[in-house]
Image (cartoon, helix red, strand yellow):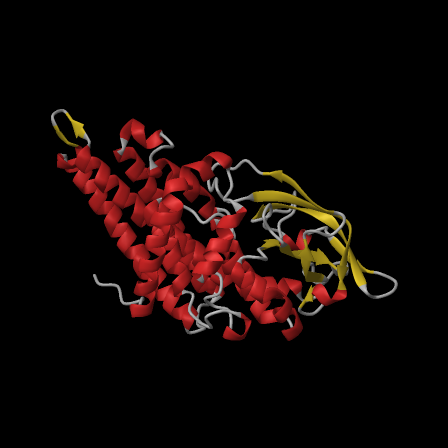
């Protein structure tokens, strides 16, 4: 079926991104995988291409678009080529919505031009060691100094994608203790300068997949954060986090669908070339049935993603809708990629083949942004259960 979710502008952008990937990413991607990180200079290239400024207002150097579909195109094209843009997805997909919604005009003037150019890369630090999905259990604190000019930040964060290259990090911290009535109270957001004294990047974490994304541990020891770098109102951080979760989960659903579609593409090409018992693997009925079943699942995931993209652009994507899309698409991707790897035989287990990297990269989709179990809880609650 013909997709109608993308218009001519999106498709023109797709051609630009595809050409950029072929010229700038594919030739060096193996080097990035070996290094376990994307070179910092690459982000300047994305800035020059306009990737970071699509949804940023023109007055700050952006294009002023209001559609998440351009980010979906990037996700699809990266998956199609079997490559990654490193931690830049967090910069745009997770951090920008907070800046646009809660930054003051003065803060936008300070941060957004660098955001657009790639000169100031952003990450967001929520998760802490031992807390996982329980964000209300965070222990990082930010106490106002006696002169009222700074907050004193102390604590640690983990699983911070983009944490190695980040120039600014949106840090979630407690400015007041939780109350007996509300564990979520007292959390605030700060846009922390990573060159501050007491700010430290710990280990670059050794992950199963997403090898080119710089995921790190961060620590804060008496970091002085100017009061002018408080994002939004003090104590309202948890509600801010909840308001951006639908887009975060939509992005994961889009990525999962893109990976599943790419897996079919890789498997189809492989089975048509690979010969077993004197004939192509594609000639066997089992191969045809497996790929046909995978395509049917990916077609269904595509319908879910496209409907969610339309709802998001209209401001109608609910938390339950996003949870449902994430749950369905990530589960579909897990099944499809596994079956496509099986069709590669032993070569599917070799990292030189993109299907092997997809298999590893895909696994985290059912964990980050809220586990599949959390998604089921959200959906069940929306059903009145």
Question: Is residue 81 rendered to the left or right of residue 203?
Answer: left
Residue placed at 70% from the left, 51% from the top? 195
Residue 304 visible here: no
Question: Is residue 366 rendered to the left or right of residue 108?
Answer: left
Residue 299 visible here: yes
In the rendered image, the vertical position of residue 212 relative to residue 13, given as above or below: above
Query: x, y (%) of residue 152?
Result: 79, 56
In the rendered image, the vertical position of residue 201 relative to residue 75, given as above or below: above
Q: Give the image quarter of residue 109.
A: bottom right
Question: Is residue 272 rendered to the left or right of residue 239?
Answer: left
Outermost residue on the top side: it is: 277
Query: x, y (%) of residue 209?
Result: 46, 39
Seen from the viewer's position, the closer of residues 5 and 137 is 5
Query: x, y (%) of residue 373?
Result: 49, 49
Query: x, y (%) of residue 251?
Result: 44, 57
Residue placed at 36% from the left, 30% from the top? 350
- State the quadrant of the N terminus: bottom left
Seen from the viewer's position, the closer of residues 39 and 362 is 39
């Amino acid at each position: 079926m013909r997709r109608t979710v993308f218009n001519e502008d999106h498709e023109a952008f797709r051609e630009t991104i595809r050409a950029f990937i072929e010229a700038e990413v594919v030739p060096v991607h193996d080097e990035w995988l070996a290094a376990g990180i994307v070179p910092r200079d690459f982000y300047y290239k994305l800035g020059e291409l306009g990737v970071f400024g699509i949804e940023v207002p023109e007055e700050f150097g952006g294009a002023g678009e209001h559609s998440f579909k351009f980010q979906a195109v990037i996700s699809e094209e990266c998956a199609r080529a079997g490559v990654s843009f490193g931690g830049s997805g967090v910069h745009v997909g997770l951090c920008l919505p907070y800046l646009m919604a809660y930054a003051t005009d003065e803060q936008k003037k300070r941060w957004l031009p660098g955001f657009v150019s790639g000169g100031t890369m952003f990450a967001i630090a929520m998760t802490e060691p031992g807390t996982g999905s329980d964000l209300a259990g965070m222990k990082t604190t930010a106490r106002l100094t006696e002169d009222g000019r700074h907050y004193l930040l102390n604590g640690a964060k983990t699983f911070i994608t983009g944490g190695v290259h980040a120039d600014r990090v949106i840090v979630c911290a407690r400015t007041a203790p939780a109350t007996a009535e509300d564990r979520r109270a007292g959390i605030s957001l700060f846009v922390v300068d990573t060159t501050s004294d007491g700010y430290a990047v710990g280990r670059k974490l050794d992950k199963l997949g997403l090898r080119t994304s710089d995921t790190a541990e961060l620590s804060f020891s008496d970091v002085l954060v100017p009061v002018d770098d408080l994002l939004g109102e003090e104590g309202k951080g948890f509600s801010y986090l909840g308001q951006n979760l639908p887009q975060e989960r939509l992005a994961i659903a889009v990525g999962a669908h893109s990976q599943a579609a790419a897996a079919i593409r890789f498997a189809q090409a492989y089975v048509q070339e690979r010969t077993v018992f004197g004939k192509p693997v594609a000639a066997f009925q089992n191969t045809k049935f497996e790929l046909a079943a995978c395509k049917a699942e990916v077609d269904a995931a595509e319908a879910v993603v496209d409907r969610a993209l339309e709802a998001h652009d209209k401001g109608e994507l609910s938390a339950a809708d996003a949870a449902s899309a994430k749950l369905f698409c990530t589960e579909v991707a897990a099944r499809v990629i596994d079956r496509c790897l099986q069709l590669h035989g032993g070569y599917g287990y070799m990292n030189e083949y993109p299907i092997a990297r997809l298999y590893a990269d895909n696994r985290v989709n059912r964990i980050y942004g809220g586990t599949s179990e959390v998604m089921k809880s959200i959906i069940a609650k929306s059903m009145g259960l």
